[in-house]
Amino acid sequence: MNRPHWIHASRLAAKRTALLALTLALLPLAGCLYPDEYTPSSQVSAKESVRIVQEAVDRYRGDTGLLPIENATEATPQYEKFRLDFAKLKRMGYLTDIPKEAFESGGSGQFLVIDEESDPQVKLLDVAVYQAIGVVQTKVNAYVLKHKGQQPVSDEVYPDFKRIDYKKLGIDDPAIRSMYTGRVLELMIDPGSAVYADYGIDIVKALDKAETKPGPGDDLRALLASESFYVPVKSPVYRLAGGEPQAFLK
């Protein structure tokens, strides 16, 4: 991202930033997840790219019986795990170009596959959200090390998860926007000081829309992934507890 050094350019950039903030604030917080009439043009483009890549993956799988994905370890989080191998898809003629939305092409999305064993689906990981949370994680790690294990937290959000106290970290709330509703995602910390985004409100809205209600042991993040072309990056497991979504360590 270019950072202008001239005064007139700085003022223009500030106006654009304010306009972007206003646009995000006006996103519907109670409607469908990215309904067509509110979908930004960039989202439309990304959605089309996901469709094209999905077709390529389906053809590859039909021809080879395999998925064009990179190797991952068991420790890799579920929604970061099976990243697409674009080089293989291009080399074997299933794609002519890597989508401009892809991180490999300088875009802000990492293409990956979920439900790899049952019904492989191409989705996007929002790299900007991933990196922003990573910055906070670095700050948290430094704080915990400096303060001999004490965490920069305030009150409890869920059992085993607490809100981050940004004043203790000496930073402002990064105000990371949800890729599902446009609201600001609250960040929280588990007992091991791992930082997560809280998608609880997003899941409540997805539950309201769901035709088939999940069972008490189901991971509710699947609702978000099924209603969007984005995965819930840096998320804990969510299950129903007392009829409400609750974050769990496992």
Image: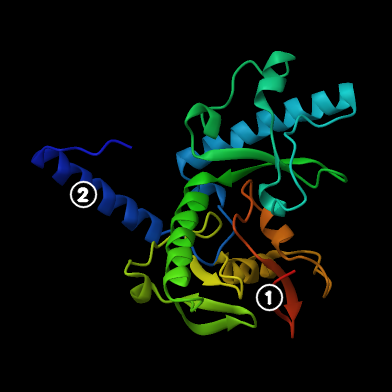
Q: Nearer the viewer, residue 133 or 142?
A: 142
x, y (%) of residue 75?
73, 53
Residue 226 seen? no
**Amino acid type indicated by mark 2:** Ala
Element marked by disc 1 = strand
Q: Which residue is mark 1?
A: 245
Of the image marks 1 and 2, the number of the one nearer the N terminus: 2
| Residue at image point 59% right, 56% down | 33
Name the image quarter holding residue 200.
Answer: bottom right
Q: Nearer the viewer, residue 216 or 143?
A: 143
**Amino acid type indicated by mark 1:** Pro
Left or right: 6 in relation to 167? left
In the displayed structure, 22 sits above or below 125; it is: below
- Scheme by which the image is coloured: rainbow
Tell me, for residue 14, which label it has, or none. Answer: 2
In the displayed structure, 54 sits above or below 244; it is: above
| Residue at image point 52% right, 45% down | 127
x, y (%) of residue 107?
49, 34
